[in-house]
């Protein structure tokens, strides 16, 4: 079952593994009969098994980011209004709402000071077909800042959605290890395909950005060599 | 006097307006320009199905059209305190917009259909998130109370701004009375308690602010 190419319209057989099977991204259920599942995107059907529980999902590389609850996202503030902000997660997509109360220790008197054009790191908190998507800058577990909030300085760029997910969930990704040998950096990766990076000076920031963007095309063996080449004139 | 038709249908001309005419349009009639013999002539035209009534007033003759039938000619508009039946049209994070369809009479039983003003759309109502429930009013999640397509029973609290009436559902007997599951694609749901509705076909529950049944 792992790695089979699936396109919408194909049937998926689940429940052949022992234990419970849940469905993950890319698979939806028939509203009338929860046991019938359909693929909703094209990609590779994969499954993860842990202690008798299996999650089946479709590994896909779609272009448009569709907000999903509890995703980490990097957004740009486009409008400031009475009790919140409108944030863009992707060009040509619907903006999302960041309430002024969606920050740690926020009250009606104590508001954050975001302006149009500011970059924020947030978590998607409400996704519903009938209202606008909402994001907030509070860690849902601890209730504190947890790395969310405004990102100052640095630069913002786009990568493919699947690559952003890969970098986000593999903290020892080869490209990041290669760059950390060249310069110190802080990075914020969003599941919406936006990455924010900040280093000591503009030259290394631009070099790091170029390295990450171009690394989408490199083979694993070439990574260290190509990063050396990019940083050669900079350091 | 020009012989005018006795019973008219909407759009039917009643009398033409000639240069020294004494005719004026009253209730249920209006002036329109119509083509006759390759000329544009202003006529008094009927807006309703009914009988033509003429009245003399200050030297002018007023032509009006009165509907035949029960005296349901009066336009009933919602007043503060009226209980109305409305359909939720749109929800945002902070308010639910509805079309008001009916007003209940003072006796509480028996609905009367509000006669809508001629050619105008439904009355519009808005339920703000703080007016949905009486407890925990500030931490209300609107998506767990109403969905577009739900029929609600609400009370008018204010005539509002020019566009919408302000409604509340914060009593036990106010809230969602009919709703379909799965965004309108499923069956009609039944209320389990004031916060939950269940679809009898799939067994899935959905959160709504339900009204206590009569």
Image: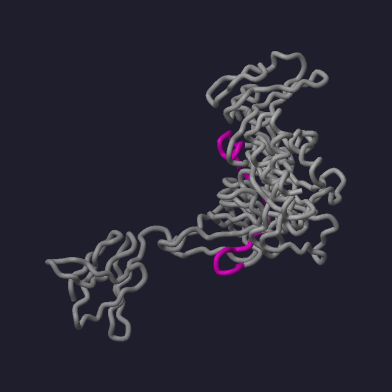
Q: Quadrant of the N terminus of chain B?
A: bottom left
Tell me if residue A21 is in the magenta stretch: no
Judge left or right: residue A87 versus residue B17: right
x, y percentage for residue A200?
79, 53
Tell me if residue B160 is in the magenta stretch: yes
- Name the residue nearer the viewer: B81 or A207: A207
- Name the residue nearer the viewer: B71 or A126: A126
Q: Is residue B87 visible?
A: no
Q: Residue at x 58, y 39 (%)?
A: A63
Q: Is residue A16 visible?
A: yes
B172 lies above or below B167: above
Q: Residue at x 72, y 41 (%)?
A: A71
Judge left or right: residue A70 versus residue B68: right
x, y percentage for residue B28?
35, 67
x, y percentage for residue B46?
30, 65
Q: Magenta segment, which residues?
A: B159-188
x, y percentage for residue A81?
67, 64
Most prominent secondary structure in the magenta stretch?
Answer: loop
B71 lies above or below B141: below
Which picture quadrant has residue B196?
Answer: top right
- Name the residue nearer the viewer: A174 or A47: A174
The scheme the figure's colours follow is one colour
- Name the residue nearer the viewer: B154 or A29: A29
């Amino acid at each position: 079952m792992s790695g089979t190419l699936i396109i919408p319209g194909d049937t998926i057989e689940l429940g052949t593994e022992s234990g419970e099977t849940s469905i993950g991204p890319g698979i939806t259920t028939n509203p009338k009969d929860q046991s019938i599942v359909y693929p909703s995107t094209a990609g590779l059907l994969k499954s993860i098994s842990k202690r008798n529980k299996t999650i089946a999902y479709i590994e896909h590389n779609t272009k448009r980011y569709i907000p999903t609850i509890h995703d980490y996202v990097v957004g740009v503030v486009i409008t400031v209004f009475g009790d919140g902000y409108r944030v863009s997660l992707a060009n040509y997509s619907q903006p999302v709402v960041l309430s002024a109360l969606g920050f740690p220790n926020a009250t009606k008197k104590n508001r954050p000071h975001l302006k149009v054009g500011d970059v924020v790191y947030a978590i998607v908190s409400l996704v519903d077909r009938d209202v606008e998507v909402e994001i907030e800058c509070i860690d849902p577990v601890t209730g504190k800042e947890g790395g969310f909030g405004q990102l100052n300085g640095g630069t913002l760029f786009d990568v493919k959605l699947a690559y952003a997910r890969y970098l986000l969930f593999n903290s020892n990704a080869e490209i990041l290890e290669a760059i950390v040998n060249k310069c110190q950096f802080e990075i914020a990766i969003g599941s919406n395909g936006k990455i924010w990076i900040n280093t000591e000076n503009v030259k290394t920031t631009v070099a790091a950005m170029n390295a990450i963007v171009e690394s989408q095309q490199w083979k694993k063996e070439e990574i260290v060599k190509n990063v050396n080449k990019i940083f050669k004139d900079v350091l | 006097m020009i012989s005018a038709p006795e019973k008219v249908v909407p759009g039917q001309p009643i009398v033409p307006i000639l240069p020294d005419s004494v005719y004026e349009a009253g209730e249920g009639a209006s002036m329109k320009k119509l083509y006759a013999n390759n000329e544009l002539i202003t006529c008094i035209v009927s807006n309703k199905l009914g009988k033509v009534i003429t009245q003399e007033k200050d030297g002018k003759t007023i032509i009006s059209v009165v509907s035949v039938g029960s005296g349901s000619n009066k336009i009933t508009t919602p007043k503060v305190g009226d209980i109305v039946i409305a359909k939720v049209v749109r929800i945002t994070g902070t308010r639910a917009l509805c079309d008001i369809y009916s007003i209940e009479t003072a006796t509480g039983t028996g609905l009367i259909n509000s006669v809508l003003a001629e050619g105008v759309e439904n009355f519009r109502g808005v339920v703000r998130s703080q007016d949905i429930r009486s407890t925990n009013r500030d931490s209300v999640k609107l998506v767990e109370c109403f969905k577009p397509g739900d029929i609600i029973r609400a009370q008018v609290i204010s005539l509002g701004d020019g566009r919408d009436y302000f409604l509340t559902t914060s009593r036990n007997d106010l809230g969602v009375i009919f709703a379909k599951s799965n965004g309108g694609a499923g069956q009609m749901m039944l209320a389990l308690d004031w916060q939950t509705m269940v679809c009898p076909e799939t067994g899935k529950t959905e959160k709504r602010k339900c009204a206590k049944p009569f």
